[in-house]
Image: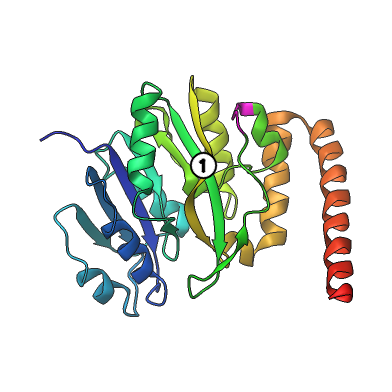
């Protein structure tokens, strides 16, 4: 059988409250050339019951204990047969029903790039819009772009399978950032949908809940790939901009 264009991987564990909208988002896509692999960590809630309500010949569910999110994502990679990988975890969803079609069109129009990427909106636990992601995907993505942080959300970072590797599970909270950098090292052509929101990202993901630990890991990763001193200087700038944003928010609240 012909391999699908997209392999969508969803890692879950006790995600009964959020997995439904992820499945509905995938099932509603107008572009049908995909497979969907759910890697579940032996959930004890209704996650598997909800998945069973969304049966599809393109979907397979593997449920067994794992060693955390990135171990599950590595496991999912082993089940894929598609040309391009999309990681869409429980609570995340495609922005609309035409998202996969837009990505497929971009792949065709630009001659099979190694990476396709776009913008991300942030949603709350109920899937309601909060706002755009703080970091904006650039018009021209390169390896150096990620020296400024994770400028493209992992879920909106679609990669040709032949250039990917496994996630480094020694990083508990930022392995996706390091993985994206390695993909960019191997990529010869990146195609951006810089004006297009591809994914609605759940605000309270694992990285968000462990923000301090994630930032410390990310600093180590940045220093390794981009140099310690440049990373230190960039973080001074990051801190200054964060303080300015916080100050502006405070002023906005007091003037309302």
- Residue 150 in picture, x, y percent from top left: 63, 44
Would you name the residue on which mark 1 appears?
118
Towards the viewer: 232 or 29: 29
Decide whether residue 142 is among the magenta residues. yes
Where is 166 relative to 107, above or below? below
Q: Quadrant of residue 206?
A: bottom right
- Residue 1 in picture, x, y percent from top left: 10, 35
Towards the viewer: 39 or 82: 82
Q: Residue at x 51, y 42 (%)?
A: 118
- Residue 101 in picture, x, y percent from top left: 32, 42
Towards the viewer: 49 or 165: 49
Q: Quadrant of residue 236?
A: top right
**251 sits left or right of 81 in the view:** right
Q: Residue at x 84, y 39 (%)?
A: 232
Q: Main secondary structure of the magenta part?
A: loop
Furthest-bottom residue in this view: 45
Decide whether residue 103 is among the magenta residues. no
Q: Residue at x 27, y 74 (%)?
A: 50
Where is 201 relative to 124, above or below? above
Q: Residue at x 33, y 49 (%)?
A: 8
| First to last magenta residue range | 139-143
């Amino acid at each position: 059988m012909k391999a699908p264009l997209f392999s969508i991987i969803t890692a879950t564990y006790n995600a009964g409250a959020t997995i439904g909208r992820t499945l509905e988002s995938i099932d509603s896509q107008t572009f049908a050339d995909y497979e969907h692999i759910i890697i579940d960590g032996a959930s004890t809630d209704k996650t598997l019951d909800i998945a069973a309500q969304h049966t599809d010949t393109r979907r397979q569910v593997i449920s067994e204990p794992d060693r955390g999110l990135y171990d599950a994502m590595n496991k999912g990679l082993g089940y894929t047969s598609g040309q391009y990988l999309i990681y869409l975890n429980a609570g995340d969803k495609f922005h609309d029903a035409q998202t996969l079609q837009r990505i497929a069109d971009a792949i065709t129009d630009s001659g099979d790039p190694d990476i396709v990427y776009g913008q991300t909106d942030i949603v709350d636990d109920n899937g309601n819009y909060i706002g755009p992601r703080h970091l904006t995907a650039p018009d021209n993505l390169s390896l150096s772009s990620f020296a400024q942080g994770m400028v493209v959300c992992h879920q909106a970072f679609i990669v040709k399978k032949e250039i990917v590797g496994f996630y480094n599970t020694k990083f508990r909270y930022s392995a996706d950032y390091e993985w994206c950098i390695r993909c960019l090292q191997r990529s010869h052509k990146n195609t951006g949908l810089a004006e297009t929101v591809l994914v609605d990202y759940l605000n309270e993901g694992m990285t968000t809940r462990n923000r301090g630990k994630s930032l410390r890991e990310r600093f180590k990763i940045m220093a390794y790939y981009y140099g310690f001193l440049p990373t230190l200087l960039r973080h001074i700038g990051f801190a200054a901009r964060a303080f300015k944003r916080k100050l502006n928010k405070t002023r906005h609240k007091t003037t309302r």
